Structures are given as structure tokens and as C-alpha cells.
Amino acid sequence: MFKLPELSYKYDSLEPFIDAATMEIHHSKHHQTYTNNLNDALSKHPELEEKTIEELLSSQSNIPEDIRVAVVNNGGGFYNHSLFWTYMTPEKTRPSEKLEKKLIDTFGSMESFKELLIKTAATRFGSGWAWLVLDKTDNLKVYSTANQDSPLQMGDRPLLNVDVWEHAYYLKYQNRRPEYLQNWWSVINWATVSETLDKSLL
Ligand code: MN3
């Protein structure tokens, strides 16, 4: 059984960038629903009980067909949100020297990385996520995924993500997704992203 992870900060801690009402509904309703629906689907196949969410999502052909769509959608929702909360913090953080160097080597500058990530997220058509990932040869990449798809499906390792489903910003920002993204940038947990890079490099 998967469990809704607790946040390491309060719902109102990311104000004024991310509002408390959005955080509460997003975590206690949306994320909880993905978690419940994932568990419901898996309950039909107890043989999958021991699998981690990463194992389930990275080898989807091993998921029985009758629950595959439910596990991909709700398991993706469970996993993507579990990461998303940890990539935000009310504290002031900075990228490690190693992360900053890799970002600058790859994208030219921190400013052009920021522009690319925000543009990728802003232009995702419909619902989905934007990501910074490590690919199979440890190169950094920025792209977006539809709905609750995750980089695990491509064999990539997530370092940072941002939710661009309307439920992530509509209460405060309505249709102003780019403004939400600019504000989200202010609460990125660079310490977590830096640690994840250290753990993920081959
Ligand atoms: Mn969401």
C-alpha cells in the first residue's frame, strides 16, 4: 500500500508564491486521490505488492493489462507529486557548485536554463509536467510530459519537476500559467535538486 507522503513544510509556507488553499487541496485531495486509486488498482494483483513505484513505472509492460492504464495514470500522479513537494521549500537555497556548473555547461547560463524550463512548462499543451532530468549517459535534459507520464518511462532520472495541471495554479493565477511558473522558481529547493544529482550520477 502506498501512503500519501507528508510535507516537510506547512501549506502556507510557500506564500505568497504558492498559496495555502492550492497547496492544501493539491496535497490532501488531488495527491490523496491518485494514491487511493493506485492502491485500488494494485489490490487486484497482490503479486505486485513488493514493487516500488519506480519499478512499476519504469517497466510498464510488466503491469497486467487490466490495471496498466490505472497504474500508469495514478501511479504517475502519486510519484510525480511525491517528487514535486520535495523540490519546493520556504527556505533560501542555492544550487551546489557541481549542479550549477553542469547547468551552465549544458544550457549556457543559469538564466538560459531558467528561461528554457519555464518556456517548456508554459507551452505544455493541456495538462502535464516539465522536467529537468539526467538521461542514460548523465546528460541534463529539459522536456515536458503529458498528463501523469514520467521520465522513468524513458529511462531518465528526474532531478526537478513542476506541475502545470490547472489544479496546480488556477485558484491564485487563473489562466496566468507563466506568472505561476516565475513565482514557483522562487521556491525551488536547490538543496534537494543538488543532492539528487549527487545520488543519481552514474
Ligand atoms: Mn498536480
Image (spheres, rainbow, N blue to C red):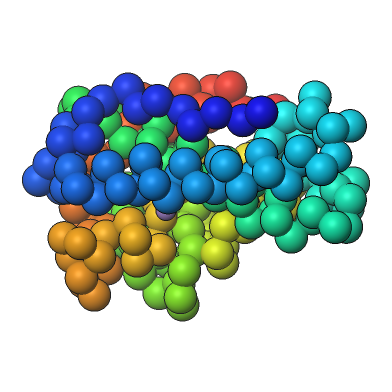
Residue at (32% x, 22% y) in the render: 8
Give how far across and how far down residue 165 sits, in percent. 40, 63
Give how far across and how far down residue 135 sits, in percent. 66, 46
Residue furthest left in the image: 16
Q: Quick check: 127 above or below 49?
A: below
Q: Is residue 106 visible?
A: no
Give how far across and how far down residue 122 sits, in percent. 35, 69
Q: How many marks?
A: 0
Identify the image quadrant of residue 137.
Answer: top right
Q: Quick check: 47 above or below 84?
A: above
Give how far across and how far down residue 114 sits, in percent. 32, 54
- Indicate left or right for 128 with 20 as reference: right
Residue at (26% x, 31% y) in the render: 89
Residue at (26% x, 60% y) in the render: 169
Q: Is residue 78 visible?
A: yes
Residue at (16% x, 60% y) in the render: 172
Q: Quadrant of the C terminus?
A: top right
Residue situated in front as seen by the camera: 196 or 87: 87
Q: Quick check: 80 above or below 2?
A: below
- Indicate left or right for 185 with 81 as reference: left
Identify the image quadrant of residue 36.
Answer: top right
Q: Quick check: 55 above or below 184?
A: above
Residue situated in front as seen by the camera: 35 or 159: 35
Q: Quadrant of the N terminus?
A: top right
